[in-house]
Image (cartoon, rainbow, N blue to C red):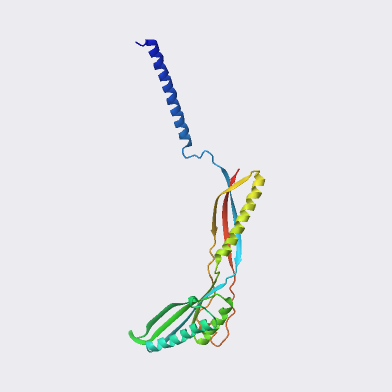
């Protein structure tokens, strides 16, 4: 038989080791609780905002040309309209070298027109109207096309607008300026507060989206161009702005 003293020592040692093991488990649980949701090392950082601006001159013009006519029959109105609009399309392609992909029919409709006398409706005529959207890639052709529209007899010239064909190139230039300004500001600030900048942690940007610049045009017959001569066309300019927000790590 094993002496009682040896058994007592064995049991005491077992209980001691068990207590130590439980204490270690409790300590690890406490440490794990302390670090839940907390990064062991949270870097300090600084956020800098830079702005970049680029002025772009529009290189695309969009204009709408159209013709409306009333005749006693649909066929007569359609023929008159087709003669005018087909003549304009032919001139755009041959004389102004406008590609077919840049000429689009915007609408074409036929509508009966009525007179009302003493509450009675009487058919007066049929209205046929057609409009073209034309994109011009050479700005010096705008005035000539307006003049040609008047000479042919079109009675609708409108929605003249100017835009930049490739704004992404200008946006990239503005972005580079914004980042350069942010970097310069961050370097200057780091010297003032005596810290060292590390890598970029995050970057975001916002930009303005310049819309088309519209010309103020209405009916061609109101422009006074039917007898020759067209107004001078000024496209103006667009300002593209990029705001860059850059977060730098502080070492």
Is residue 187 among what the camera can see? yes
Residue furthest to the left in view is 120
Where does the image place residue 65, in percent across and percent down from the top left?
49, 80
Q: Quadrant of the N terminus?
A: top left
Locate the C terminus by quadrant: top right
User: Which residue reaches farthest front?
Assistant: 1
* Residue 9 occupies quadrant: top left
Judge left or right: residue 78 versus residue 218: left
Going 40% across and 80% down the picture, which residue do you hit?
A: 109
Residue 71, visible in the rendered structure: no
Residue 54 shown left or right of residue 159 in the figure: right
Looking at the image, is 86 positioned above or below residue 29? below
In this orientation, which residue lies closer to the viewer: 224 or 197? 197
| Residue sitting nearer the eye, 121 or 128 | 128
| Rendering coords of residue 146 (x, y %) | 54, 81
State whether residue 1 is above or below residue 197: above
Residue at 57 percent of width and 79 percent of height: 141
Residue drawn at the location 58% of the way across and 61% of the way down: 172
Q: Nearer the viewer, residue 213 or 119?
A: 213
x then y, percent, for residue 99: 51, 78
Rendered image quadrant of residue 83: bottom left
The residue at the point 48 percent across, 75 percent down is: 101
The location of residue 34, given as percent across then percent down, is 48, 34
């Amino acid at each position: 038989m094993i002496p009682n003293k040896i058994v007592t020592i064995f049991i005491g040692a077992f209980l001691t080791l068990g207590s130590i093991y439980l204490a270690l488990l409790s300590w690890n649980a406490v440490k794990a609780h302390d670090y839940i949701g907390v990064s062991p090392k949270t870097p300090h950082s600084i956020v800098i905002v830079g702005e970049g601006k680029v002025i772009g001159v529009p290189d695309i013009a969009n204009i709408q040309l159209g013709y409306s006519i009333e005749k006693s029959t649909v066929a007569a109105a359609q023929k008159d309209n087709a003669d005018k609009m087909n003549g304009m399309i032919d001139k755009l392609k041959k004389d102004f070298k406008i590609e077919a992909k840049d000429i689009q029919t915007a609408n074409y409709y036929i509508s009966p027109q009525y007179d009302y006398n003493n509450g009675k409706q009487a058919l007066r005529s049929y209205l046929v109207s057609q409009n073209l959207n034309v994109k011009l890639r050479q700005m010096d052709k705008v005035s000539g096309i307006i003049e040609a529209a008047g000479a042919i007899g079109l009675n609708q010239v409108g929605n003249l607008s100017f835009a930049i064909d490739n704004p992404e190139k200008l946006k990239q230039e503005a972005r580079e300026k914004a980042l350069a300004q942010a970097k310069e500001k961050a370097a200057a600030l780091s010297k003032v507060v005596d810290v060292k900048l590390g890598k970029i942690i995050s970057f975001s940007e916002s930009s303005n989206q310049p819309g088309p610049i519209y010309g103020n045009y209405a009916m061609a017959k109101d422009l006074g161009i039917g007898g020759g001569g067209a107004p001078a066309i000024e496209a103006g300019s667009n300002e593209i702005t990029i705001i860059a927000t850059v977060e730098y790590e502080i070492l």
